[in-house]
Image (cartoon, rainbow, N blue to C red):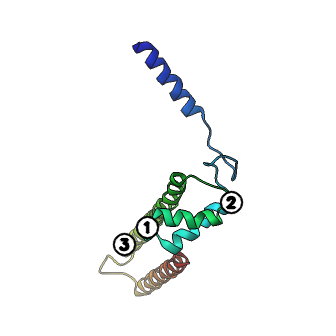
Amino acid sequence: LFDETLKKLMENKKKIFTRKERTRWGGKRSTEWAKSDIEIINKFIHRFGYGNKSWDALCREMAAELSKKYDQTEVKRMYWSLVLLTFREAVEDDIRDARKNRDIETTLSQRKTTDGGSLGGNDDEKKKTSKSDQLIFSKTLEVTFIMGIESLD
């Protein structure tokens, strides 16, 4: 009995891990989403958020616009997948920005210690370094500002 159960579990595991993920939009099954349906769900996320309306009412409104009938559980799964994906992308953006800032700060601190760290030194070199630091800082502000505006869209 134990060997048969183990054998069945191993066969089921093989079936699960050999199943390939689809790489195309659409399909006839209720778990195969059309790209237009994902865009509709995304529109509902922007309009109602998550939790501002009951699932029954939300699914009724979405059903009128979706290209085919999806099970309510599948709609919830896709809805939350899109919401969580948005959070993940936002965190990845924050991490990337923090790394850029850290790299810029490291570069600036290295320049300050090598160029202006001694009591003696050339004032012209210090002015050039100061101007390049200001240029890096202003470019960083521009990029941050542009990224902030793009995230509002």
Label 1: element kind:
helix
The residue at 37%/76% (across/down) is 112
The residue labelled by disc 3 is 109
| Label 3: few (<14), some (14–19) or many (≥20) C-alpha neighbours in 10 Å | few
Q: Quadrant of residue 99?
A: bottom left
Q: Which amino acid does label 3 sit on?
A: Ser
Mark 3 or mark 1, which is nearer the start of the sequence? 1
Q: Are marks 2 and 1 in contact (CB under 8 Å)?
A: no
Please state which amino acid type lies under the numbered disc 1.
Answer: Asp
For the residue labelled by badge 2, is the local secondary structure a helix, a strand or a loop? loop
Q: Where is residue 31 in the image (x, y as percent from the top left)?
A: 60, 48
Q: Residue 86 carries which label?
A: none
Identify the amino acid type marked 2: Ser
Who is closer to the viewer here, 134 or 6? 6
Does residue 31 appear to the left or right of 108 in the view shown? right
Q: Which mark is residue 94?
A: 1
Residue sitting at x 62%, y 49%: 30
| Residue at 52%, 66% in the rendered image | 58
- Closer to the camera, 37 or 146? 37
Is residue 1 shown above or below 45?
above
Residue 55 placement (x, y as % from top left) = 47, 62
Residue 67 circle label: 2
Q: Does 43 appear above or below 135?
A: above
Q: Residue at x 50, y 57 (%)?
A: 76
Q: Distance between the residues labelled 1 and 3?
A: 22 Å
Indicate the position of residue 147 as horizontal and vertical percent values.
Answer: 52, 76
Secondary structure under tag 3 reads: helix
Say if 4 sits above or below 29 in the image: above
**Residues tagged 2 and 3 counted as in contact (Cβ below 8 A):** no
Can you give x and y, in whole percent of width and height, for residue 122 in the image? 40, 83
